[in-house]
Amino acid sequence: MAGAGFYKQICSACHGAQGQGAGNVPSLAKGPTQQAKPGEVMWYITKGDLSNGMPSWAGLPEEQRWQIVSYVQSINTATAVPSMGNGSPAPGSELKSISAPPATPPFIDFRDEKPGTVRKITVNDLPKPFATQSAGNGPHVVPRPEGVWPQALPNFKVQLYATGLENPRLIRTAPNGDFLVAETEKGDIMLYRGITPDGKPQLSSVYASGLNKPFGIAFYPAGPNPQWVYIGNLDSVVRFPYKNGDVTASAAPQHIADVPGGTGHTTRDIQFSKDGKTMYVSVGSGSNVDDPDTHPAEKNRADILQFNPDGTGQKIFAYGIRNAVGLAIQPETGDLWCSVNERDALGDNLVPDYITHVRPGGFYGWPWWYTGPHQDPRHEGKHPELRDKAIVPDVLLQPHNASLEMTFYEGKQFPAEYKGDVFAAEHGSWNKATRVGYEVIRVPLHQTGKASGEYEDFLTGFVLPSGNPWGRPVGVTTALDGSLLVTDDGSNSIWLVTYTGK
Ligand code: HEC
């Protein structure tokens, strides 16, 4: 369990190797921590209790905090739990519906998600900060009950392409049609080839291992015969020599550039400009809302950086982008787009995550402003000169959705109206009282290459009526035959979506 390693590194110094506690430091192996809901423990460790000696762990990536919470809550029961580490639901109990009040449109929760439903959030819809309490409602991921399956519109078929992965994250299609998948925690890049008639890979292979939290994957140069595959590690960009057909890396990785590592958001995505002259690398913030003016660890973070493809010439391409997990190049215009996780702890319906094209030199608000000229109350009075510079992103998504990888659909299989649209994976909320996200969305561009602010539910059903999710979409990519592949680090699998309506 990944949480065990983090616990040892971060928590054991005070709470003891077995969570037994010592002196004024409480035991985690028994007492309140074992009785609390995972969300409550998450909330507590995120805030901390500084005046009593418990640090705030808000600076650790959310994912890492959840792994620690799962680990800590398993300490006293470590020998008795089944393989998922968080218990199996009693048969049928997950199918009983929760009774939380309905969401107020345009904001929704998982119960409202339905393939084909179009949504639009505008700046005028935003509540005031702290209109509702900040929730600690992390996912308790349960095994997928038999018969439960992701939902798409009629005429789309969903198949289970691959199972048994370990924490599959970003997925990208090579020019020859192979799929590379980052297994971030394990440090591996997996390769999958082909789609059999029953929707399975023809071949799978470990392409590379021993990487440091790999996430971004990019082939270079563009065209049918790339020579390199670039990988975004936590603190560096590396590249492997590559030729079509490779199933394992043919040489050790070359170091291309350092990027800021440290605590906080760990995903570094990579894209190359259409002319091949610029490499873009997204680097998320180290914290929820620390002010870079007074926190040197935030230098060159919450930015999209640019480099020459050889790693020289680092510059800031755009800034104030809290955590651009997914980058994509719009194939017609060559514009860079991104999919962004906004900040937490301002209430259920703030701050919208977003998908947007990125203006060179653009400022997107973090941490002093959000969604254009709205000041973050935790930075009252700071940087008034940036107020009118803060850009309102193109598509506002549900706050706390956790929008991850995005891709432009250039396939020929789906109906013509999908051509050029964006697909994006919404990993799902923790900071909202009733869960939202846990779906794949489509951003229709209506063949204009521009967003209208609308998005649409595309692939749903990853949360059970009980509110517990069994799956969490992370990555999306288009296969050469136009199918869509979706990685899911809740059920550790890859889903295949095909259009059957022709
Ligand atoms: C510097 C020492 C220190 C570190 C490091 C530390 N804690 Fe704590 N923790 C404390 C203290 C002291 C308390 C008691 C605070 C109080 O009195 O309210 C506490 C309380 C807690 C509680 C509440 C327990 C209860 O019974 O009320 C939890 C849960 C917890 N810590 C989890 C963690 C986790 C998880 C980590 C690692 C990410 C961690 N702590 C790291 C010192 C620490």
Image (cartoon, rainbow, N blue to C red):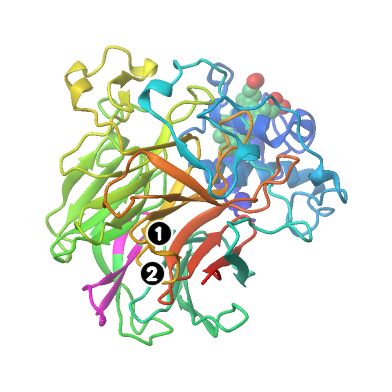
Q: Mark 2 points at which residue?
A: 411
Q: Residue 278 or 145: which is nearer the viewer?
A: 145
In percent of the image, x 36 and y 25: which residue is there?
123
370 displayed left or right of 16: left
- Picture quadrant where residue 284 is located: top left
Whether ligand 1 has any atom under 8 Å from the Cβ at mark 2 is answered as no
Q: For residue 333: magenta?
A: no
Q: Do the residues labelled 2 and 1 touch (CB within 8 Å)?
A: yes
**Amino acid type at mark 2:** Gly
SS of the residue under disc 1: helix
Q: Is residue 455 above or below residue 440?
A: above
Depth check: 100 or 116 in front?
116
**What's under tag 1, amino acid-wise?**
Tyr
Mark 1: C-beta under 8 Å from nearest atom of ligand 1: no
Residue at label 1?
A: 418
Q: Give the range drawn in magenta.
A: 217-237
First of labels 2, 1 by sequence position: 2
The residue at the point 63 percent across, 80 percent down is: 198
Q: How many numbered callouts?
A: 2
Residue 441 in the image: state x and y as whole percent.
48, 50
Q: Distance between the residues labelled 2 and 1?
A: 9 Å
Q: Ligand 1 is located in which of the four quadrants?
A: top right
User: Disc 2 or disc 1, which is closer to the eye?
Assistant: 1
